[in-house]
Every structure is written in C-alpha cells, then in structure tokens.
Amino acid sequence: MLNKKLTLICARSELDKTSFITKNVSYKTQPVSVIVFAFEGNAYAYINDCMHMHRQLNCEKDTIFDETGQYLRCSMHGFVFEPKTGECQSPVCLGERLQALQLQEIDGMLYFAEKRLALID
C-alpha cells in the first residue's frame, strides 16, 4: 500500500524522453510550478523559481539546462545552478539554493514525497 504522503508525478521512464517536465502544485498552501528532471541517472525536483528575480527557469526559453547540459540555467538572466544540489553558481546569488522537493521511486513510478504538496493540474 502506498504512503498517503506520496503524490504521483509520472513514470520514471518519461524523464528519459524529455529534458524536463513541469507540474503545477500547491506547496505549503501556495501555488507554484515545479521542474522535474533526470541528471546523471537520478531524478530531481525543484520549485521552478530563480531567486534572483523570482522567475521560472524556463520563462523565456523552453529549457532549463545551459548549452553544455551540465547546469540548470535561468533563461531570463543566465544564472546557473548545480543540478544535484540546486546551489547557485552565479556571483549575485552564489551559495543560495533552489528549493528542492523530495522524490521517491516505486516500481518505476515517480512520486513527490512531501507532506504539504498537492497537484493542481
């Protein structure tokens, strides 16, 4: 039986077919966009909000990675983030982090494992 705190995202295999997916959720009672992606074989999820000017990473281009594919990149001002930790590598916000969300994979399905999260769409 599944834990009631788990919220289904998608089949893990879907992340192998695209560079990222977004989900609209209510997190701590606030509506937010979340990015979910695979990097070096692992799945990650972050609130889709660059701390520099509070824009979604994909606000100007439908991508979240830089041209090398090694860093997350805000398409508005080019701030870059370490995909595994969400830590900003750009001088203005150096050391700050994207808000990570816990994930859990069960039988090839990927779930949010957060108490205060619900899908909106």
Image (spheres, rainbow, N blue to C red):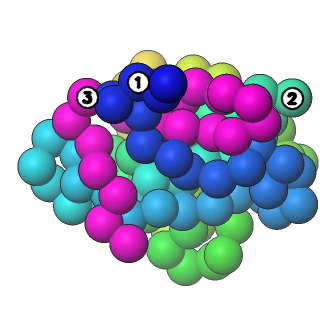
**Number of marks drawn:** 3
Which residue is nearer to you in this view: 107 or 67?
A: 107
Q: Amino acid at mark 3?
A: Lys
Q: Which residues are magenta?
A: 97-121
* Residue 119 in the image, given as x and y percentages of width and height: 35, 58
Quick check: is 103 in the magenta stretch? yes
Q: Residue at x 79, y 56 (%)?
A: 14
Q: Which residue is mark 2?
A: 41
Q: Alpha-carbon distance for marks 2 and 1?
A: 25 Å
Q: Quadrant of residue 51?
A: top left
Mark sitting on residue 115: 3
Question: Is residue 49 toward the left or the right of residue 16 in the image?
Answer: left
Mark 3: few/some/many CA within 10 Å (<14, 14-19, 20+): few
Asked whether the beta carbons under mark 2 and mark 3 sit within 8 Å of each other, the answer is no
Task: Tell me which label, 2 or 3, sits earlier in the chain.
Answer: 2
* Residue 71 in the image, given as x and y percentages of width and height: 72, 40
* Mark 2 secondary-structure assignment: loop
- Outermost residue on the front side: it is 1
Q: Residue at x 84, y 48 (%)?
A: 13
